[in-house]
Image (cartoon, rainbow, N blue to C red):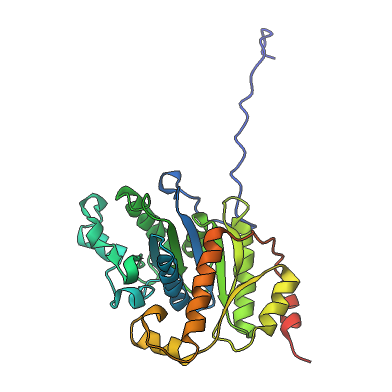
Amino acid sequence: MSAVGIPIQVQQAAPPPPTDGEGSVQVHLDPQIEIDKAKVFAVYGKGGIGKSTTSSNLSAAFSKLGKRVIQIGCDPKHDSTFTLTKSLVPTVIDALEAVEFHPEELTTEDFVFEGYNGVMCVEAGGPPAGTGCGGYVVGQTVKLLKQHHLLEDADVILFDVLGDVVCGGFASPLQHAERALVVTANDFDSIFAMNRISAAIRAKSKNYGVRLGGVIANRSARTDEIDRFNEAVGLKRLAHFPDLDVIRRSRLKKSTLFEMDDAPGLQAVQDEYLALADALWRGTDPLDVEPMRDRDLFDFLGFE
């Protein structure tokens, strides 16, 4: 009450926005660059595990199913799409630098390149080492795609994300994705990275629509350790691509697996990619995953 008996209205402070996880300082999604229509997938995994090979062949498989696909490479070395385009295409950052960061001066042809079977390829690129944030680059890329009305025509958007870096800017594709996929091999380091990535995706799912879609086993003759880990934490294997020589040669020939000449195991791998694309298009159940603590995982994967 005031001195004259008039009730005083106390202004309530607005509650702080929810965080993505303990200690998170991740920038939240700008609603103006939200992707509305397309199915969006983000591919993560340990560095060098074959994410770009997996992503490009999955994009090709989606296109074989008649889908309009955009693949966005989120690695500063900008080599995500070279098997689709047969070259290292200029990046979004290259294009922006050329117009002194006036995006209104860009045309679609400056940063979008058509690859195999009509897959539209974009390389986000990155700031010079130690000077900026990958989140800015991903955000600018999606913003440009939306401004040029390319998102309206896409059925599938696939982010191929740098290594196992899931903090800061390189977690930003998770703000757009419907499903996150983890590529792993049947070894300790790959599964260790998968566990950490799963924890990051789980944190993002508190505030965004992204959910874990499953695991893609790659470069492995067997999947026993992957399957044992999946069963323990609630993950699911969606596909298995063994370490075949034809896959290695496809990278050297700058080609997708759908362009390679007949070779042992090739048809089975092509069919596996088509089946994976079909399953993802029809929709996978969101997985409720309980990642392990690092020490527990170390003991779980240890040998007696």
Residue nearest the viewer, comparing 283 with 172: 283
| Residue 30 located left or right of residue 285 | left
Q: Quadrant of the N terminus?
A: top right
Q: Residue 70's x, y, as percent? A: 38, 62
Give the quadrant of residue 201.
bottom right
Q: Residue at x 64, y 65 (%)?
A: 199
Give the quadrant of residue 109.
bottom left
Q: Residue at x 56, y 67 (%)?
A: 181
User: In this rendering, is residue 112 above or below 270?
Assistant: above
Q: Residue 266's x, y, as percent? A: 47, 85
Number of on-image labels: 0
User: In this rendering, is residue 286 above or below 267?
Assistant: above
Give the quadrant of residue 93.
bottom left
The residue most toward the right is 304
The residue most toward the top is 4
| Residue 268 located left or right of residue 85 | right
Q: Quadrant of the C terminus?
A: bottom right
Q: Is residue 294 visible?
A: no
Q: Residue at x 50, y 67 (%)?
A: 277
Q: Residue 124's x, y, as percent? A: 36, 65
Q: Is residue 169 visible?
A: yes
Q: Residue 251's x, y, as percent? A: 38, 84
Q: Residue at x 22, y 57 (%)?
A: 100
Residue nearest the viewer, comparing 275 with 179: 275
User: In this rendering, is residue 275 above or below 222?
Assistant: above
